[in-house]
Amino acid sequence: PIILQLLYAEHGYYPVRNPKSLGLLDHVVVDEAQDFGLMEIRALLNAVDQNRTMTIVGDIAQKIVMGRNFNSWEEMLRDAGFEETTPVLLTVSHRSTKEIMNVASRLRLDPLPANSTSRSGPVPSFIRAQVPQVIPNYVGQWIQKRTEENPNALSAIICRWPKEAQLLVDQLRQLG
């Protein structure tokens, strides 16, 4: 998208506006759009001929690039010039189990449909500590126990802030 914007700045038009390049693309798909900024989305939209179509998909809950101004689908569509467009929300998870989706629904404070996933799995566990200093030990013991039970199992520790997560990672590495 940035290269397209630079081409526009240099030539005054996007490549698709050049008669020689029309018809090259029928449909563009943008995935992981939650990690794009508005300028990038606009550049991609402007690079597609008006008679062509575009699909933009992403999950705001999976946003990993901080500092981008992608806060909601409605806001992004409005700012990109699509005031009359309503996003289609998918509510089925193909990656997570019912048990994980139930926890996610409680944490997000918005109920998910009962059929949001068909897979079952272990119930997530919660570790509570009276003082923050013991959390790395508790978490380390928990990971060790899960690994002994099943060396191929995947585990996730969810922290509220990236700095908390990095601190916990550093502390767990110190513990071995």
Image (cartoon, rainbow, N blue to C red):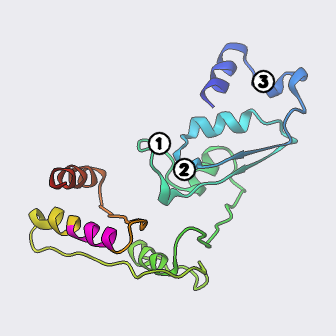
- Circle 2 sits on which residue? 34
Name the residue nearer the viewer: 74 or 146: 146
Is residue 131 shown in magenta?
no
* In the rendered image, the vertical position of residue 67 relative to residue 125, given as above or below: above
Residue 133, image x, y percentages: 9, 62
SS at mark 2?
helix
- Circle 1 sits on which residue? 68
SS at mark 1?
loop
| Disc on the earlier residue, 1 or 3 | 3
- Asked if the residues shown at circle 2 and circle 1 are in contact, with their CB atoms under 8 angstroms apart, the answer is yes
What's the CA distance linking mark 1 and mark 3? 25 Å
Numbered range of the magenta stretch: 141-148
User: Based on the displayed image, in which of its 4 quarters is residue 168 positioned?
Assistant: bottom left
Amino acid type, label 2? Gln
Residue 90, image x, y percentages: 64, 68
- Circle 3 sits on which residue? 15
Q: Horizontally, is 71 left or right of 175 in the view? A: right
What's the CA distance linking mark 2 and mark 3? 25 Å
